[in-house]
Amino acid sequence: MSAFWLLFVTTVLKVSWAQLDAQRLTLALLDRIHEPLLIPKGERAPITFIMPPEYISDNIAPFASILVNKSSASQAGNQKFQIERNDEVSKLIEEFSSLERTKRFSTFTPSHMNMASTMTKFLMDQKDIKSFFNAAAIFRDNVNPGLFVHSFVVSIYHREDCKSIKLPPLFEIFPEKFIDGPTLMEAKQLALMLGDSNKQTSQLTSTVFDLESNPTASIREPEQKLAYFREDIGINLHHWNWHLIYPFQGPENVVNKDRRGELFYYTHEQILARYEIERMCNNLPRLVRLTDFHAPITEAYFPKLFTQTASKNWTPRPAGVLLKDLDREADQVVMEINELDLWRSRIMEAIDKGRVQKPDGSTLALDEFDGIDVLGKIVEPTEYSINRPYYNNLHNFVHLAIAWVHDPLEIYLEGLAVIGTVETAMRDPVFYRLHGMINHIFQKYKETLAPYAENELKFNGIRLTNALVSTDYITSSNTLYTFWQRRTIDLSRGLDFFPRGPVSVKVVHLDHRNFTYQITAFNDNLLAKKALIRIFFAPKYDASGEELNFNKQRTLFIELDKFDVQLKPGSNTITRRSMESSVTIPFAQSTKSLEYNETAINDPGRCGCGWPHHMLIPKGNTEGYPGVLLVIASNYATDWTPTKVSKNSGDVCQTAASYCGIFNQKYPDKKPMGYPFDRLSTAKTLAEFMTPNMVSQSVKIFHKNVVSGRNSLDDADVIYDESQKYEENLTSV
Ligand code: CUO
């Protein structure tokens, strides 16, 4: 150890690990992820990690003393934590070195996922929180940042002793995956220009850039009409979070969760249904799913994203490219496009036969209870799937084949396109065609199941007679309203290597006015009954204006809410606010609010996984997009597994259960996901399908092409000025 380090380490303020605030450490480790931990992390009370010299990269080692001195001078009073050397971690770092720090990490790439699985298992196995953070800190500075963030976040989500930790919004860690390159560049330039003077005013002002002005394509590209959906930060975060909670590989209790295969089907099916409805609202033709892996991919996508560490643009894809066989040595991926056909035909054969092939030659029936789950785990797949060698890796390799179409043989040393990572894939129009192909497989299986019998749909003694929707400040019933919302998000934690200052970016996203459901229910029983209420929305008409046939319409129902309610004998009025939706989560709280506001940390609101609340309602159109709400009551006693929440569990981070399940517990809804619309029906119309415990209501969604503004980073969700009652004059349904 050099004289400098000896002197430095002995003068460090020793703080026992037992006293560490795990929340602050988590935020610090995810702060400015490309900067070494020698530079203090965090704003409110910066933390410096004292790293044993062997874990400091050769590039930085010669400047370590300068960095530490500079940090000490500028961050007086910051806390310092000594990282202990760990031989096992050192060995793993060596093992992970084949994935360079500048490369794009992708869970779809088996060699990357093997590393992530090993690191996650290692972090999960750390016996106490001290060892966990010690190992995490070393990994952070010594392995690929994407690999680290995946493994660290998955471990935080799943370790018992991390249950109370709130993660920062993940777009703050890698803003380059969510915000276009030119905007980020402008932000960095200003941060550099303002330097320390920016810091002095940090509590007062914020330097803001506007994202509106950098579209990914011109309006001559029809798909650009849906950029607000595909490139929405909340939607992409939802998808990333979902795959962090349900990784393909890792410790068994992390991967092999209750009904994960079925949830893979349902979550992505709902994304597709929402996307289809948005297409219809924008007068775009219906989605054409991928069918032929040898046909040109008609969609182009030019993402305009820039990778900071690699100093590279995310590779664009022109229209009309053909998928080619992959042989990429560094990524250890060799695959022929013909294999995709083979794996898909084996899966389709299993569906036709109603049985999947097991490795020992026997077969397993795809029954109506578990069949979709077995199939979901085969299609995705996971390391716990049945007969992985035979059914192989269809979904992940279609992602990769498209993601490397520009450089299938690694001749040009180019990395993945956006479709190749879960945090960016939903930006690309081809994502929906890919998942259209995957969803078709699941729908083929669902078509083999008998339609629900009447007694599987009814709820004896319960009748729903009316459903009404009232939007705040609007007198006409059954009308919903969407508009554009401007939101300011903090970039300061993601502008690594630039002066830390209050640099923000303004983004514009779809939003809607809050509304209330009012449902009338009759309980004809003598005793009170607890009911599970599910609320769905679907379009009424197809593109040609014809009323949708029920079997087409049922695949377009999107879940808006699910909750329980006690029904007393006789008449009941059920009132439910849109903000209470159990499928959505609010826009992520900024790290700033987690750092500066203790109540934000202890807020028991949902976080992490869930559909973004601002996208709950499809955009609609200016004339009023016609749709239908369907409300169904079913028996709570038979349909629901109550969540076990202990008061002192410290579990402050609940997810939206419908799309994300509940951590370490059974999926609460015992019905098949998507019930009652997941199976073919003999009914021709929705009215014919309905039983007395269901009620429908025609609604119209009006879109107002105006932008409403937010003034601060964490404004509440109620935005519109009450005086803006412009919709009053619109015609009701
Ligand atoms: Cu979520 Cu293809 O599964 O991206």
Image: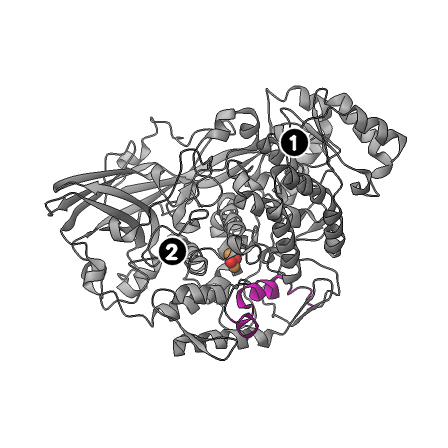
Quadrant of the frame with the N terminus: top right
How many numbered marks does the figure carry?
2
- Does 406 appear in magenta? yes
Helix, strand or loop at disc 1? helix
Q: Position of residue 10 (x, y in %)?
A: 80, 26
| 245 lies above or below 587 | below
Looking at this view, name the residue that lies furthest to the right: 3
- Amino acid type, callout 2: Met
Chain part drawn in magenta: 387-408
Rendered residue at 23%/61% (across/down)? 456
Residue 261, image x, y percentages: 45, 61
Is residue 311 something that shows in the picture? no
Of residues 324 and 12, which is closer to you in this image? 12
Residue 21 placement (x, y as % from top left): 59, 30
- Label 2 CA crowd tier, 10 Å (few <14, some 14–19, many 20+): many
Q: Quadrant of the C terminus?
A: top left
Residue assigned mark 2: 280
Query: Where is residue 117, by image quadrant?
Result: bottom right
Magenta segment's dominant SS is: helix
Mark number, residue 17: 1
Name the spot of residue 53 as percent of width and height, x first.
82, 38
| Foreground tag (1 vs 2) | 1
Q: Residue at x 83, y 42 (%)?
A: 59
